[in-house]
Image: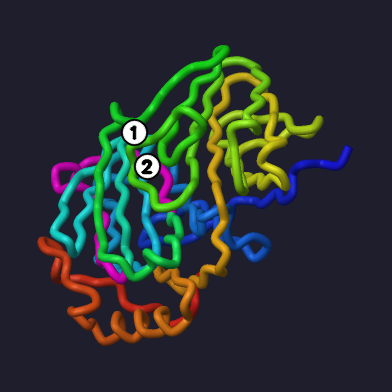
Amino acid sequence: MQSNVGLILEEKAADIGNFLVGRLLPFKEKRAVGPFVFIDHMGPTCLKEYQNFDVPPHPHIGLSTLTYLFEGSIFHRDSMGNAVEIKPGEVNWMTAGKGVVHSERTPDYLRNSPQFLHGFQIWIGLPKALEQSDPSFFHIDKDQIPVWEENGIQFKLIAGELTDKKSPVPVHSPLYFLEIKTKEAQKVNIGHKLFGEVGMYVLDGTVKIEGNDYGSKQLLIAKNASLCEFETNGETTLYLFGGEPFEEERLMFWNFVNSDKEILEAAKKNWREQNLDAFPKVPGDEEEFVPFPAKKLN
């Protein structure tokens, strides 16, 4: 029988400030999985009392960002005036549309103490009709996220919709971002609930697929989502993400995603020139900004 594992990609390191993250997407071999165009695995890391997580104001267009933490805390501010602390299990969902600026920093009350930080930062492309929409922001508390158990397997639907379960995160296209946990070896047959394209990331533990074992720091992409089944080898935490891909290719340069190259070029020019009509300042964080890179990063 032919394998259903289409790609096995190793996590690669990337720098954001003084912090190393494991970048899962994009890769040369695979630029997107469904509408998911960018996934960073942050940490786990221990920041000393003299270290902080500081990403100064920077712009986005044409995408939604999803921040989900396992440990630690990040304070989000954006050019729409939102200012909120994100804690483990909560979801920050920001839709950039035609343009937004935001910063992510260690909260003031934690800046002189050691801290752990661990989580995901994810970019999801927008349908073409929404790429130039007004920006928006939602913060979802952890007790609003659907959690359930089936046959000893724990599920959490962080975003999207699967059969009779739906996350309150206001996504813009058919997708899913699902956490699966087992405490002992379990067979998981979930392909009948999935659709579109699907990727798997094993955070802790290992899984067995078609007789082969796969562990952490690997991204697995299935050829056929409906055939997605696997076995966990004990205490395991993994994530399935994917959904319906867009008809049009999504172009990416730095923090900008769009299906129209001219819109990307205009965003580059506006950020270089600090055009406040396109990219307003972030209230409460007006002094700094991330300069446009000298070379392509993605």
Task: Tell me the residue at 57%/21% (across/down).
Answer: 235
Question: Within 10 Å of the Cα at label 1, are there few (<14), some (14-19), or many (20+) other Cα atoms?
Answer: some
Going by the numbered disc 2, the residue's amino acid type is Tyr
Residue type (three-letter) at the residue carrying disc 1: Gly
Secondary structure category for the residue under label 2? strand
Residue 21 x/y as whole percent: 46, 53
At a point 64% along the width and 60% down the height, the residue shown is 30
Please name the residue shown 33% across and 37% down the image: 168
Determine crowd level at label 2: few under 14, some 14-19, many 20+ residues with C-alpha closer than 10 A.
many
Q: Earlier in the sequence, mark 1 or mark 2?
A: 2
Taking 248 as reference, is 120 above or below it? above
Name the residue beneath numbered marker 2: 68
According to the picture, the residue beneath numbered tag 1 turns out to be: 89
Residue placed farthest to the left in the image?
A: 284
Q: Is residue 60 left or right of residue 139?
A: right
Please tell me whether residue 104 is drawn above or below residue 159 in the rendered image.
below
Q: Residue furthest top?
A: 151
Quadrant location, the N terminus:
top right
Label 1 with label 2: CB-CB less than 8 Å: yes
Q: Which residues are magenta?
A: 98-122
Disc 1 element = loop
Quarter where residue 77 is shown: bottom left
In this view of the protein, which residue sits in the foreground, 272 or 134? Answer: 134
Question: Left or right of 26: which side holds 225?
Answer: right
Q: Position of residue 224 (x, y in %)?
A: 71, 44
- Percent across and percent down for residue 95 are 32, 58
Q: In the displayed image of the protein, which residue is found farthest to the right?
A: 1
| Mark pair 1, 2: CA separation | 6 Å
Q: Position of residue 193 (x, y in %)?
A: 59, 32
Residue shown at 66% from the left, 47% from the top: 221
Number of residue marks: 2
